[in-house]
Amino acid sequence: NAGVTQTPKFRILKIGQSMTLQCTQDMNHNYMYWYRQDPGMGLKLIYYSVGAGITDKGEVPNGYNVSRSTTEDFPLRLELAAPSQTSVYFCASSYWSGTGDEKLFFGSGTQLSVL
Amino acid sequence: GQQLNQSPQSMFIQEGEDVSMNCTSSSIFNTWLWYKQDPGEGPVLLIALYKAGELTSNGRLTAQFGITRKDSFLNISASIPSDVGIYFCAGRNTGANSKLTFGKGITLSVRP
């Protein structure tokens, strides 16, 4: 069972370049999330989606875009990379019915450096 | 916004010792989740709690959902070297737009 799969594992970008971080899940989860993790700062929510065709901003959305055309895929787009976007990015998914029993599962992360 | 407090930022224990971590919130939560993150990997769910007062075990790990619904505790008994990692708590309240809030994590080191 693959769970949540993220690609690439590592990436180095130059300032101003763009890239897409890929995320796919095979658990038929309705909710998907993108977090960034900076040392000692925990996990900050960038964007999330409650289902195909629906996305919403999280805590730190500036400089990022997302789309959710299918239940399985939730790519994260960086249009003009900046050094402040150097971080480790995690995609996550869960089945949320609104009444509890939620379990959030994470991918293995993408380490991004912007130089 | 909602905040979860985990402290201290780092803990150092001897192999075989028990360790307790807590997580406190300024808001009431209806779900508490505890995660462990190994270096270079994503967080892995350890224990999920959904009811105030609930006490749940997973091997050597035990977690409790505080009765005030503003805190949760994770205990690790008889620690071993592979317990090293970052431990995160996360909480969620109910509502259509509720989102999980994560603590900043506690880095646990276990001395052999």
Image (cartoon, rainbow, N blue to C red):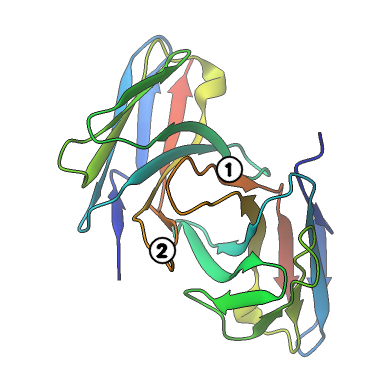
Q: Secondary structure at mark 1?
A: loop
Which chain hosts label 1? B
- Residue B78 is left or right of residue A90, and the answer is left
Q: Is residue A42 visible?
A: yes
Amino acid under disc 2: Ser
The residue that disc 1 covers is B43
Q: Position of residue B75 (x, y in %)?
A: 33, 23
Res. A115 visible in picture? no
**CB within 8 Å, label 2 to label 1:** no
Residue B48: percent from left, percent from top: 44, 34
Label 2 or label 1, whichever comes before in sequence order:
1
Q: Which mark is residue A96?
A: none
A102 relative position to B30: left or right: right
At 50% across and 65% down in the image, what residue appears? A44
Residue carrying label 2: B98
Q: Residue A14 at what x, y percent from top left?
A: 80, 82
Q: Observer-nearest residue: B31 or A10?
A: B31
The mark closer to the camera, 2 or 1, is 2
- Left or right of B59 in this view: A65: right
x and y percentages locating residue A65 in the rendered image: 69, 82
Total labels: the figure holds 2
Residue at position x 67%, y 57% in the image: A91
Instruction: Residue B57: name its quadrant.
Output: top left
The quadrant the N terminus of chain A occupies is: top right
Q: What residue is drawn where x is 83% and y is 77%?
A: A19
Q: Given the current orientation, which residue lies at the most extreme left position?
A: B68
Type of amino acid at the residue the image marks with label 1: Pro
